[in-house]
Image (cartoon, rainbow, N blue to C red):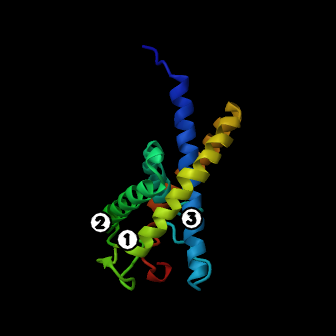
């Protein structure tokens, strides 16, 4: 029995993985920046040890199908992605609470919140970030990935994949950083 690998699917998977990690890092930078803006200084608010937040990577990939909606106008894309992101955040909070006993954010001090899990202002921020991602960042990222030679891309996927896997494994062995409420 021989395995036939479709080169196009492997290249697509490599691009998706690099996009995922890119958006994981962007999410981490956003959260760290938010900590500074809120006057709390540097806080690694991520679940993992490294500078990446997988929820942002997954969330960004889940927003990519909305690229097809761009012809409907920016307000329609904003409304649809804001509602979708809010739903993802709500579901994620329940999954994290079930798995870890807590989730990584608390919006109880914000107006128009639901159980501290979702609130209007963070939803609007996410909607604006998604608009920037879909209209500016993702086209530039894809342009950069398309220019990259396959050997470079394969090396980056290998190195970053190993680092990400080690970080995930380490978190399994060392437990959650969710125990320190001051982080969140």
Residue bearing mark 2: 94
Residue 124: % across, % down: 44, 69
The relative height of residue 168 versus residue 42 in the rendered view (above or below) is above
Place of residue 101 in the rendered image (x, y in percent of width and height, measured from the top left): 32, 71
Q: Where is residue 141 drawn, in percent x and y?
A: 63, 46
Secondary structure at numbered mark 3: helix
Classify mark 1: residues with Cα within 10 Å, few (<14), some (14-19) or many (20+).
Answer: some
Query: For residue 167, which quarter of the picture?
Result: bottom right
Reply above or below: 92 against 37.
above
Residue at coordinates 60% horizontally, 62% vertically from top-left? 51
Q: Which residue is mark 1?
A: 103
* Camera-side residue of 74 and 184: 74
Tell me which label, 3 or 1, sits earlier in the chain: 3
Is residue 124 visible from the viewing direction of this image? yes
The span from disc 3 to disc 1 (Cα, nearest Å) is: 16 Å
Q: Outermost residue, top direction?
A: 1
* Residue visible at 48% across and 69% down in the picture: 125
Q: Tell whether label 1 touches label 2 (CB within 8 Å).
A: yes
* Labelled pair 3, 2 in contact (Cβ < 8 Å): no
Residue at x 65% of width, y 36% of height: 146
- Asked if the residues shown at circle 3 and circle 1 are in contact, with their CB atoms under 8 angstroms apart, the answer is no
Q: Position of residue 120 (x, y in %)?
A: 38, 74
Q: Which residue is mark 3?
A: 28
Residue at 43% x, 47% y: name it. 72
Q: Is residue 77 above or below residue 7?
A: below
Q: Which mark is residue 20?
A: none
């Amino acid at each position: 029995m021989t395995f036939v690998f479709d080169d196009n699917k492997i290249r697509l998977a490599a691009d998706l993985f690099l996009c995922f990690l890119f958006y994981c890092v962007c999410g981490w930078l956003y959260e760290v920046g938010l900590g500074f803006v809120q006057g709390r200084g540097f806080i690694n608010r991520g679940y993992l040890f490294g500078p990446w937040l997988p929820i942002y990577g997954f969330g960004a990939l889940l927003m990519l199908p909305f690229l097809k909606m761009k012809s409907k106008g920016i307000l329609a894309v904003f409304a649809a992605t804001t509602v979708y992101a809010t739903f993802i955040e709500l579901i994620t909070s329940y999954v994290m609470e079930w798995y870890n006993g807590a989730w990584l954010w608390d919006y109880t001090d914000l107006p128009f919140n639901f159980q501290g899990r979702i609130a209007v202002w963070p939803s609007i921020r996410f909607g604006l970030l998604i608009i920037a991602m879909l209209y500016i960042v993702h086209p530039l990222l894809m342009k950069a990935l398309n220019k990259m030679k396959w050997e470079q891309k394969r090396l980056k996927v290998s190195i970053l994949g190993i680092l990400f896997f080690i970080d995930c494994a380490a978190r399994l062995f060392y437990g959650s950083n969710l125990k320190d409420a001051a982080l969140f």
